[in-house]
Image (cartoon, helix red, strand yellow):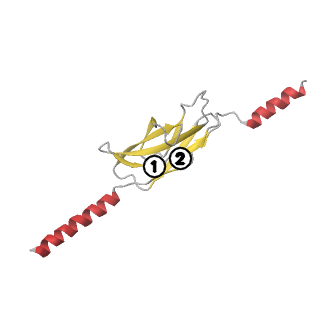
Amino acid sequence: MKLGQKNIFTIAFLFVIVFGVASAQTISLSDPKSQSDGTILISWTVDSETGIDHYEIYRSTSNVGQFVKIGDQKCGVFEFKDTGLFKTTIKYFCYKVIAIATDQSVRSQSAIVGTLYNDGTSSTAKRTWGSIKAMFR
């Protein structure tokens, strides 16, 4: 009888280990990229979408600051364009992506990744405009 209890315990333990590991997804967040239209493109990969309902995208001005939810993305789409940066003077943003399970619990969270923000005006354009003005002096 003790052998039977030991086998049941072993099977239950292995069940928890196997399904506990299988249900955890890894989200890899790529470096966010400033776009020429003044937005930032956030993209990520995930090893499995099993049990994931959607993704939530968060932004902060510091990697230790308070993160604010800026949007949701459905499964199967692995990028999000942050369009809420119009006329900001802030030049550094951090992002994280959280996978939300079908039961609305947090399934997984990406690492925090930061980027410098370029508001869509390039220094090349500024130099060119300066060169044009200089021609008429």
- Total numbered circles: 2
**Residue type at the position of mark 2:** Val
Q: Which residue is mark 2?
A: 113
Residue 3: percent from left, percent from top:
13, 75
Q: Give the quarter of the image for residue 97.
A: top left
Q: Give the quarter of the image for residue 48.
A: bottom left
Residue 34: percent from left, percent from top:
61, 40
At 89% from the left and 28% from the top, the residue drawn is: 135
Secondary structure under the numbered disc 2 in the rendered image: strand
Q: 10 Å neighbourhood of mark 2: few (<14), some, or many (≥20)? A: some
At 21% from the left and 64% from the top, the residue drawn is: 12
Q: Which mark is residue 110?
A: 1
Residue 62: percent from left, percent from top:
53, 39
Q: Are marks 2 and 1 in contact (CB under 8 Å)?
A: yes
What is the distance, in whole Å, between disc 2 and disc 1 at their CAs?
A: 9 Å
Instruction: Find the residue positioned furthest to the left.
Output: 1
Secondary structure under the numbered disc 1 in the rendered image: loop
Quadrant where the C terminus sits is top right
Quadrant where the N terminus sits is bottom left
Instruction: Find the residue positioned furthest to the top.
Output: 137
Question: Which of the two residues, 93 or 52, is positioned nearer the viewer here?
Answer: 93
Taking the image as shown, residue 28 lies to the left or right of residue 40, namely: left
**With respect to residue 115, does 14 lie above or below?**
below
Question: Which of the two residues, 75 or 70, is positioned nearer the viewer here?
Answer: 70
Q: 10 Å neighbourhood of mark 1: few (<14), some, or many (≥20)? A: many
Taking the image as shown, residue 91 lies to the left or right of residue 82, namely: right
Residue 112: percent from left, percent from top:
50, 46
**Residue type at the position of mark 1:** Ser
